[in-house]
Image (tube, grey):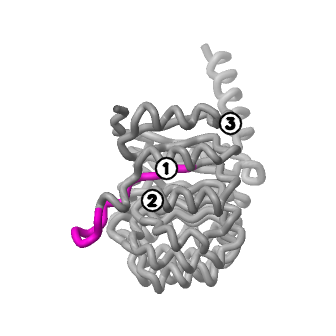
Amino acid sequence: MERSQRVCKRWNNELLSSLKKLTINDANISGEVFATIVSKLDPNNFKHLKLGAEAFIWDLKPLFRITYLSSLDIHHSPSLASSAFIAAVQNLPHLTSIRISRSMIRLDDAIPAIVEHLPKLSHLTVVHAEDDVTDAAAFHVTKLTNLEDLSFEAYALSLDDEIVRAIAKSLTKLSTLTLANTSASSSLAYLSQLKMLTKLVIPLSYFPPTSLSLLPAGLRHVDAKFCDDSVESLVTRCTALKRLSIGSYFPDMDVSISSTRLTDASLISVAKLMELRALTLKYNVTYDGLMALQHVSTLELLNLPDSLVC
């Protein structure tokens, strides 16, 4: 019995010391157990930590010994206070990727700390936190000039033109931009400054046909709202699209809905994308319309969420 316990302990130690990535999700572990686990990780080898729901961890101090931790993902961790997160930011200088999702962390405090202590941060994702992202916090993000991937999925915040303009002017290294609740199409003109942008996800924004000439031609992934003419313009502008998600635009009552809704004509346009691999259609389509895609030989995934095929 004693021998088996020794073997088990040795196996656990060797396993943990070789890990580079760890996800603690729905584990309901205590802070003491967390500290024990972290103490066995190789501080020069371990890189990525995700703390998920029910991980009742109050203090991130055990992590401070992980010198080269590069990625920290806090997802739905109700016990983790802002002060504990900020202390981690101050003591983990090699972090290059942070994701904060539905936590109790106050972003108005956390984001300035990130800007101050992690100027080399390249990936930042914020998903609908307790107090969401305020305009002030959003402006702080524009100081992170090394960002390559920025995702604001905070649904209580609709970024206005001034903030989008600041993002486009300052964050010139962005290759991925997600603005989940930005609906002002006038902001899209500023995105032409992002020459390295390949992925644009703004699912509430409508692309009028006249705005498409302003988008970076190198886009490979787009998620937004369109009309038939917009899709044709997009396909003409961004010929190397690999992933596309399109939904119908429902305008104010003083605009003709018939002039902005999507029809089978959009699928005829999409069929011109010879490198398309994944297509999501968030509107009702016809069988004949889908048949227009049969010659897109590169298409691997067709997603029809809540769509009616008639």
Amino acid type of the residue tagged 3 in the rendering: Thr
Q: Which residue is mark 3?
A: 298
**Disc on the earlier residue, 3 or 2:** 2
- In the rendered view, tell whether residue 117 sits above or below residue 97: below
Residue 226, image quadrant: bottom left
Q: Within 10 angstroms of label 3, few (less than 14), some, or many (20 or more) residues?
A: few
> The magenta stretch spans which residues?
244-256
Q: Which residue is mark 1?
A: 266
Q: Residue furthest top?
A: 1
Of badges 3 and 1, the one in the foreground is 1
- In the rendered view, tell whether residue 40 sits above or below residue 249: above
**Residue at image location 43% in from the left, 59% down from the top:** 227
**Disc on the earlier residue, 2 or 1:** 2
**Residue at image location 37% in from the left, 46% down from the top:** 283
| Magenta segment includes 141 | no
Q: Quadrant of the N terminus?
A: top right
Are circles 3 and 2 on residues that touch, CB within 8 Å? no
Q: Quadrant of the C terminus?
A: top left
Residue 2, image quadrant: top right
